[in-house]
Image (spheres, grey):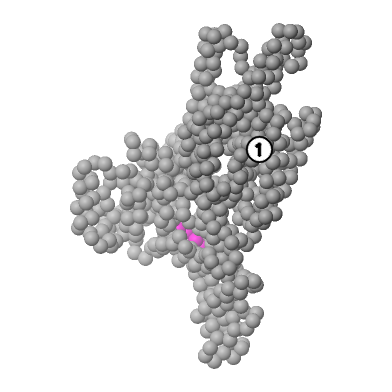
Amino acid sequence: MRFSQFIGQDDAKLGLILNAIDPRCGGLLLVGGKGSGKSILARLARGILPSGTPFVNLPLNVTEDSLLGGIDLEQTLRNGQRTLQPGIISRANGGVVFVDDINLLSPELLALVMEPQGRGVEIIEREGLTERRESIFSVLATINPEEGDLSPHLMDRIGLCAVMEEQNNRDRRLAIMRLANSCPVFTVEPDQEIIADISAARMLLPNVQLSPEALEYLHQVVQQNISPGHRGDLFLYAAARAYAALQGTSEVEEAHIDRVANLVFSHRRLQIREEEQATTESEQNDHNQDQQNQEQQDDQGQLPPPPENGENETENQPTGEGEQESNASSRESADREEIMQVGTPFKVRRLSFRTDRRERQASGRRTKTRVKGRGGRYVKSLLTSPDRDIAIDATLRACAPFQKARGRDRCLIIEQDDLRFRQRERRMGHLVLFVVDGSGSMGAQKRMVETKGAIQALLLDCYQKRDKVAMVVFRKDRAELVLPPTASVDLAAKRLAVLPVGGKTPLAAGLLETHNLIKRIGMRHPETRFLVVLITDGRGNQPLVDKSSMKQEVAGLTRLLAEQNQCDFIVIDTENKGNLLRADQAIELARQLEADYYTVEALQAEYLSELVQSRTVS
């Protein structure tokens, strides 16, 4: 099958051709649902590369040694000196590295690929040897948003992005079926016409220039498609030059810039637009709610509701008989409990956490960890290991340089100091502690509805990652463990549905109960990895002991929690950010805990899925 026979997907085809002309276009990410033809089109790209251009597949189970290279055993045994064997990155110099389902590749290994790709130089430090090699290649990758997203940082390092649109046209679908029938066995055939065009464009590329007017227009396009950093500018510059060369002209025109702009900015600008839309929608919802409350008050002649933090506005005023009745009414309103429905759950953005050095008997899908025993994936070799799981490859590399000096005749001579052992890793689940603010302030403007929706979404994520969950609720004057640690996410969802709100905000009590729970579980199960999800607006108003020391209580407890090495923290701010009088106390709480900070809107999944949906609808 030839590249030009592939039906439709003009943007994706153009992105592949531009990268074949100039690797400085930064690679291409093909985004689409299952069965959209991403992998087939990516493999057909081999048929448009000039003869001799490397096209290297990067498997998802690749090791660091395979990626970066290691000791060449044959040469080392023959010469008695360590000799480096090139890895996948070295073999791809001047060509393409293809990663199918890039979101499933380990972030650590993906960083090892993207670093030399952006720098143009590969620095190898293996087995006591250091070497620098030229490393100019393009990254060609596919991703299905239904199987997870890619971090914005790594997305930004990929120059171009094309969405594989669903082919709903009847004629195209029939044409695809006929093509599949005519090619029962998939093979890649050279597409000589496109190869000739790419070769001609490569020869013309050094002479392609941007006039001052074209450069000014490029700057205007960049301003219209706001994206963080300067990578978008540089990739647009390279792609416009490559497209001009493909068109056979030595001067970049405005039409060339317009043609490639969407490839450069589609995966960069959408995230910012989503954030703006979320803010606008939140402000509009708040405005509509305020109008409804005001209309109800005008119709019913009611007084405004008490402040969100549960404090009594009139407690510092002189109190007569009528005022005492008003105070009693306010306290009764603050103590009144209300059960709110669960809001609409959503897909949670990808959450990733640091790896530690502890060895565990692990199971789950959340975070990578070192494992005891001989299960798991072999990732590197060690000089010592209590499991005595010998790494044959590393042992051979260690003994190879000394075989000549040891007088080797036929068999390898391996001594005790040559032995190397395997370090293995696998993914593990966390114990996720939901610490939820159930005070009266969460009932204002029905914020507990969307908060429960966010918790429900996180519970689904916990189910997918095989985490255990527990739930602590703090309200009135105490904190309570309403759900002990359990693997039943369904049970957690049921407890969430009947969770009431009302009363003051004993934030310090919630932090203290969380600390005590971590200590109790940690003593019984020291290998446990905790994820604490603190959901609050941070406006504590009920102390443990004395109101004058309330801030000191919270600061001391956050310090104790932050010292727990086996814990990660997330703070989800439920405060209304459209309010001019917002306190942003949850931000300070996140800083004290050294936690990741999100609003409910920012917790939603990254933007690849919406990118696919928007292109499909259009």
Measuring 54% from the left and 46% from the top, which residue is drawn there?
A: 351
Q: Main secondary structure of the magenta part?
A: loop
Q: Give the position of the N terminus as an image quadrant.
A: bottom left
Measuring 31% from the left and 46% from the top, which residue is drawn there?
A: 9
Within-10-Å neighbours for mark 1: few <14, some 14–19, many 20+: some
Q: Nearer the viewer, residue 413 or 21?
A: 413
Residue at image mark 1: 480
Measuring 46% from the left and 54% from the top, which residue is drawn there?
A: 104
Q: Nearer the viewer, residue 464 or 348?
A: 464
Secondary structure under the numbered disc 1 in the rendered image = strand
Tag 1: amino acid:
Glu
**Residue 101 shown in magenta:** no
* Number of numbered labels in the structure image: 1
On the image, which quarter does residue 380 sit in? Answer: bottom right
Whether residue 449 is visible to the viewer of this picture, yes or no, is: yes
Q: In the image, is residue 30 above or below residue 96?
A: above
Residue 202 percent coordinates (x, y):
37, 55
Q: In the image, is residue 57 above or below residue 483?
A: below
Measuring 63% from the left and 54% from the top, which residue is drawn there?
A: 528
Q: Give the position of the C terminus as an image quadrant.
A: top left
Q: Nearer the viewer, residue 215 or 438?
A: 438
Magenta stretch bounds: 134-138
Whether residue 441 is visible to the viewer of this picture, yes or no, is: no
Q: In the image, is residue 292 above or below residue 216?
A: above
Residue 512 percent coordinates (x, y):
71, 40
Is residue 565 toward the left or the right of residue 63 in the image? right
Q: Nearer the viewer, residue 181 or 554?
A: 554
Residue 135 percent coordinates (x, y):
49, 61
